[in-house]
């Protein structure tokens, strides 16, 4: 038998096909702005690590660090990233080799390209997560402040866009502060996972050159090291969780935006957006559209799509590039959009004008007190709730047909409905029902934990405000840590590459 021809090994002997450059490398280079700063820091930390182990000659160390400091001082859009060379890392290699020759190859010692890029992504994303957690806490803080302001603003709360029970705008608005704060807390929890270094992991199983993976982690200010080397190179679950939390946060903001869009209509006239968050119609002079709310709602759909898309590409077999090729751009873009939208929603809430009189009028003419009336009949007349519910339902049907508002329902109307349903009256004709039917008295009665009574809303606002402040402080401490780490890495590089300059700065 003739042996099959040997399979050719080694790197490609020709350049990339133009179709690959256009469809793949160009897209990856478009993500370079997100990675540029992190790649510079990752490369500097690697060179310093090699130097500390006595692996790189001093002159090569100085040349590389000088070049990397130059790259760090160069804005991403001015650095010669060129898809013709491949992904951003390859563009950097081509540029560095053109400047200092094969000395640039020390950047590969014990480290594949993906390790540098994985580190750069985490350096970028960890800062975004901390910023987003702080901004989510800020939204909760501002929403809570408006809740305190409107703890006495009575309104008909709604389900299915139907009037439900009397409440206050403060109690309503506070229901959006809580989930935003939970997502801020989740982001900081997820940051503990993202803020771990994959450095020293090699391709899948480490390297004989770098036997202490804590060095790069400590240099770059990571909170820890990803334990398993193969997992360190290929894990995506942390990014999925972050994207899911970002989508959850904007979903909460979208719910609020949808409500406000409806309530800002002339048909409701419950609220009005500040001019700065609206846009005029170019055709219809009378219109002032709540454009900011459309932006928030649309962004929610975009983020759901990005989360779904990332889940789709990350389901491939392990150790495949498509797990993370798209993460380098999609994750930062999603978090940047979430940050912008959260800031926008915070501004909308902070400047929102609330029409107290219109809300009070609407709650006064409706039937949001029906549940309380049924509960009163259970307490007063010793009947089961289903019977009370059906009797009150008859009362409301008749009252609405006759144009009688809920606050004007009488005991005679209740007895008449009871006789129709059960064959006998309940004996409350002539009873004063005003306290039972008064929406404000109903609000005051909701003084159990989490209720709409002003004192309870105030208690929740104070507790939530303290929690939000703690979370914002925790996020800021993380950001300060990252800034100090960045400054320390660059200072260490300057001390080697520019010793005279560094010495002058020390003095």
Image: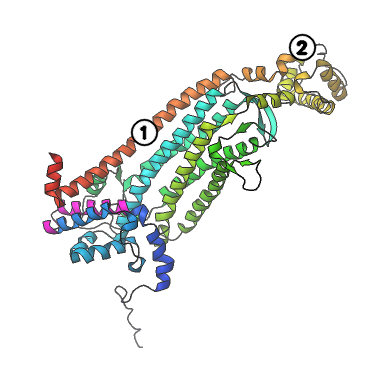
Picture layout, residue 350 above or below residue 55 = above
* Residue that badge 2 annotates: 432
Picture layout, residue 276 above or below residue 116 = above
Quarter where residue 373 is shown: top right
The residue under the point 30% across, 63% down is 91
The residue under the point 23% across, 54% down is 70
Res 220 visible: yes
**Left or right of 408 in this view: 356:** left
The residue under the point 43% across, 72% down is 19
Res 320 visible: no
Quarter where residue 27 is shown: bottom left
Front-lying residue, 216 or 342: 342
Q: How would you classify the magenta stretch by its main secondary structure?
A: helix
* Residue that badge 1 annotates: 474
Quadrant placement of the C terminus: top left
Quarter where residue 277 is shown: top right
Boundaries of the magenta span? 36-59
**Where is residue 74 shown, x and y percent of the image?**
28, 54
Give me the C-alpha separation between circle 2 and circle 1: 55 Å
């Amino acid at each position: 038998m003739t042996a099959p021809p040997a399979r050719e090994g080694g790197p490609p002997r020709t350049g990339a096909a133009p179709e690959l450059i256009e469809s793949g490398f160009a897209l990856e280079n478009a993500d370079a702005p997100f990675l540029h700063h992190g790649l510079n820091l990752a490369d500097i930390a690697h060179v310093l690590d090699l130097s500390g182990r006595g692996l790189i000659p001093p002159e090569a160390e100085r040349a590389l660090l000088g070049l990397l400091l130059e790259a760090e001082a160069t804005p991403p859009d001015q650095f010669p990233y060129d898809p013709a060379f491949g992904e951003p890392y390859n563009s950097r290699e081509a540029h560095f080799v053109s400047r200092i020759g094969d000395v640039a190859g020390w950047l590969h010692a014990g480290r594949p390209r993906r390790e540098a890029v994985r580190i750069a992504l985490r350096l970028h994303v960890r800062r975004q997560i901390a910023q987003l957690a702080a901004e989510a806490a800020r939204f909760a803080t501002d929403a809570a402040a408006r809740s305190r302001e409107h703890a006495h603003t009575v309104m008909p709360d709604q389900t299915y866009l139907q009037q439900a029970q009397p409440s206050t705008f403060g109690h309503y608005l506070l229901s959006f502060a809580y989930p935003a704060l939970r997502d801020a807390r989740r982001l900081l929890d997820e940051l503990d996972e993202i803020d771990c270094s994959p450095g020293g992991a090699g391709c899948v199983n480490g390297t004989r050159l770098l036997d202490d993976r804590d060095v790069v982690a400590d240099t770059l200010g990571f909170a820890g090291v990803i334990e398993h080397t193969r997992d360190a190179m290929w894990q995506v679950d942390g990014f999925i969780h972050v994207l899911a939390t970002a989508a959850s946060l904007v979903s909460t903001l979208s719910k609020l935006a949808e409500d406000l869009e409806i309530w800002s209509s002339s048909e409701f006239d419950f609220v009005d957006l500040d001019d700065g968050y609206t846009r005029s119609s170019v055709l219809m002079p009378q219109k002032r559209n709540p454009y900011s709310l459309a932006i928030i709602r649309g962004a929610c759909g975009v983020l759901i799509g990005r989360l779904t898309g990332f889940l789709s590409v990350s389901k491939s077999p392990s150790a495949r590039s498509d797990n993370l090729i798209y993460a380098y751009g999609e994750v930062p873009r999603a978090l940047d959009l979430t940050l912008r939208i959260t800031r926008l929603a915070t501004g909308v809430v902070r400047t929102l004008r609330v029409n107290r009189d219109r809300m009070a009028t609407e709650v006064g003419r409706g039937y949001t007190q029906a549940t309380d009336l049924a509960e009163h009949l259970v307490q007063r007349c010793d009947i089961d709730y289903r019977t009370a519910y059906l009797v009150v339902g008859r009362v409301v049907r008749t009252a609405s047909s006759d144009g009688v508002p809920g606050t004007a329902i009488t005991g005679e109307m209740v007895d008449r409905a009871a006789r129709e349903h059960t064959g006998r009256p309940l004996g409350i004709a002539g009873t004063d029902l005003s306290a039972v039917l008064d929406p404000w008295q109903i609000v005051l009665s909701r003084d159990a934990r989490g209720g709409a009574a002003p004192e309870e809303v105030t208690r929740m606002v104070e507790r939530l405000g303290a929690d939000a402040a703690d979370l914002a402080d925790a996020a800021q401490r993380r950001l300060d840590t990252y800034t100090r780490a960045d400054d320390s890495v660059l200072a260490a590089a300057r001390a080697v590459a520019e010793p005279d300059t560094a010495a002058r700065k020390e003095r």
